[in-house]
């Protein structure tokens, strides 16, 4: 199919509105052409990943600062993923001033481009809540799966750069998961095990991702209902698979291929991430919601972190601000735990060298696979009991 561009789109592509816009349009058009799109469509919002200096390095930083010099701006509401560190509390993380300054320059560049410096991988909670049925250009695979599956919106799994290009142009190619016909399930997954925690749903998502690859699954026998279960399911799926959404509808007619998942399958995944004694616990992948922070504050009100152990919570800047005003941060930190806003446990350049405990299969996957950390994965209550004691 031939991609049809409007006169306005053609003129941007020809460089009539400057080199920055031309490059961004070239990327949007290039992706749309390769995918066989017939046109570009307007997007309601964008969410950009690749914010961490750990991730994009000096080359990424230079490119962002070049875009700023070219005087381009996002043309739709745009939020950004977490960086490597909490910029307000960087001194206590032990990173160098040089590292902090580079991470800050990345965020400053995004601000100059017009993005909202939300620094969160859960934009759908407070910062960037999409209207049902809207078309988006979101990166951050866990947020993409969450949005397509639970919020009834349309977005492809963008990369950080393609989401930024779409944010600046205000459009994306009309292909992939923007089209209803591409959102039909291609494989049925029958879950034959009772799931009792958000971690269970994370592990289920992870195993499904491994089994289905890029085929959209229709999942029968298990539905994540709480936001924690949904968030962990989406993040687990995003860590191991490439698919951008799933269906929980029982009305599946097209998919003939069937996969069954039983208790043994999920136990096998869990045992891949079991180490010995836990030194540090990271909670908040994807970022903790405000209601999760409230629950943790209530729990930690009666506990303190044991000597030699640490408990670190990760959340968005918006949720942190509200939690701070409600006095929750004071309660949590009185227990000896730390709360970081706008950062990610996986990109943290000063990770614990000891055994890391997590309730998130995505943290477990990335820290053990690409960073070589020793991981213990279990439910958050067991983790809290492992590193804290009652007072
Ligand atoms: Fe968010 Fe980092 Fe986890 S970006 S989903 S906290 S790996």
Image (cartoon, rainbow, N blue to C red):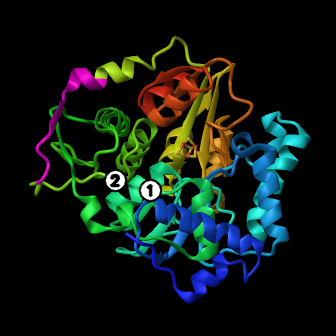
Q: Say few, some or many: other residues with alpha carbon within 10 Å of mark 1 (under 14 / 14 to 19 / 20 or more).
A: many
Contact flag, marks 2 and 1 (Cβ < 8 Å):
yes
Residue 144 disc label: 1
Query: Going by the picture, which residue comes out furthest to the top?
Result: 276
Would residue 256 be counted in the magenta stretch? yes
Q: Is residue 238 left or right of residue 109?
A: left
Pick the residue in front: 151 or 171.
Answer: 171
Q: Would you say residue 114 is visible in this rendering? A: no
Task: Tell me which label, 2 or 1, sits earlier in the chain.
Answer: 1
Looking at this view, is 350 or 147 the one in front?
147
The residue range painted magenta reads: 254-266
Instruction: Give the class, few, some or many, for how many residues have Cα within 10 Å of label 2's Cα (few <14, many ≥20).
Output: many
Assign a secondary structure to mark 2.
loop
Residue 32: image x %, image y %?
A: 48, 65
Q: Is residue 357 above or below residue 144?
A: above
Q: Secondary structure at mark 1?
A: helix
Query: Left or right: 388 with respect to 233?
Result: right
* Disc number for residue 245: 2
Say which quadrant the N terminus sits in: bottom left
> In the image, what residue occupies the spot 25% across and 64% down?
181
* Farthest residue, direction front: 2
**Distance from Cα at disc 2 to Cα at disc 1:** 8 Å
For the point 75% across and 75% down, the residue is 72
Residue 189 location, x and y as percent?
19, 40
Q: Which residue lies at the image location 14% right of the left edge and 40% below the top edge?
A: 257
Q: Is residue 55 visible?
A: yes
Q: Residue at x 17, y 56 (%)?
A: 249
Q: Image height check: is 383 above or below 208?
A: above
Residue 322: x, y in percent? 61, 62
Rendering coords of residue 255 (x, y %):
14, 48
Whether residue 332 sits left or right of residue 246 in the image: it is: right
């Amino acid at each position: 199919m031939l991609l049809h561009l409007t006169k306005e789109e053609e003129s941007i592509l020809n460089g009539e509105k400057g080199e920055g816009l031309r490059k961004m349009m070239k990327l949007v058009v290039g992706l749309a052409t390769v995918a066989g799109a017939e046109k570009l469509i307007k997007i309601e919002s964008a969410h950009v990943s690749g914010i961490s200096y750990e991730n994009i390095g000096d080359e990424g930083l230079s490119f962002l600062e070049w875009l700023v010099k070219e005087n381009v701006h996002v043309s739709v509401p745009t939020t950004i993923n977490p960086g490597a560190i909490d910029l307000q509390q960087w001194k206590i993380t032990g990173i160098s001033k040089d590292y902090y300054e580079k991470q800050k320059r990345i965020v400053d560049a995004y601000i100059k481009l017009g993005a909202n410096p939300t620094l969160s991988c859960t934009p759908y909670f407070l910062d960037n809540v999409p209207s049902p049925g809207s078309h988006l250009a979101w990166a951050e695979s866990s947020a993409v799966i969450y949005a397509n599956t639970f919020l009834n919106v349309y977005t492809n799994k963008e990369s950080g750069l393609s989401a930024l290009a779409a944010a600046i142009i205000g459009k994306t190619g009309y292909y992939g998961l923007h089209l209803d016909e591409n959102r039909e399930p291609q494989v049925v997954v029958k879950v034959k095990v009772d799931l009792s925690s958000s971690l269970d749903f994370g592990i289920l998502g992870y195993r499904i991702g491994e089994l289905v690859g890029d085929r959209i699954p229709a999942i029968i026998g298990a539905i994540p209902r709480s936001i924690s279960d949904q968030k962990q399911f989406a993040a687990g799926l995003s860590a191991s698979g490439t698919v951008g959404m799933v269906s929980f509808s029982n009305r599946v007619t097209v998919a003939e291929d069937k996969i069954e998942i039983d208790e043994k399958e999920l136990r096998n995944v869990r045992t891949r991430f079991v180490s010995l004694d836990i030194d540090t616990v990271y909670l908040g992948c994807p970022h903790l919601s405000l209601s999760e922070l409230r629950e943790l504050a209530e729990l930690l009100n009666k506990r303190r972190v044991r000597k030699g152990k640490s408990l670190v919570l990760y959340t968005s800047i918006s949720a942190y601000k509200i939690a701070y005003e409600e006095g929750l941060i004071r309660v949590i930190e009185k227990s000896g735990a730390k709360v970081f806003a706008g950062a990610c446990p996986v990109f943290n350049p000063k990770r614990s060298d000891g055994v890391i405990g997590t309730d998130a299969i995505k943290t477990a996957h990335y820290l053990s696979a690409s960073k070589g950390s020793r991981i213990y994965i279990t439910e958050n209550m067991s983790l809290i009991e492992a590193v804290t004691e009652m007072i």
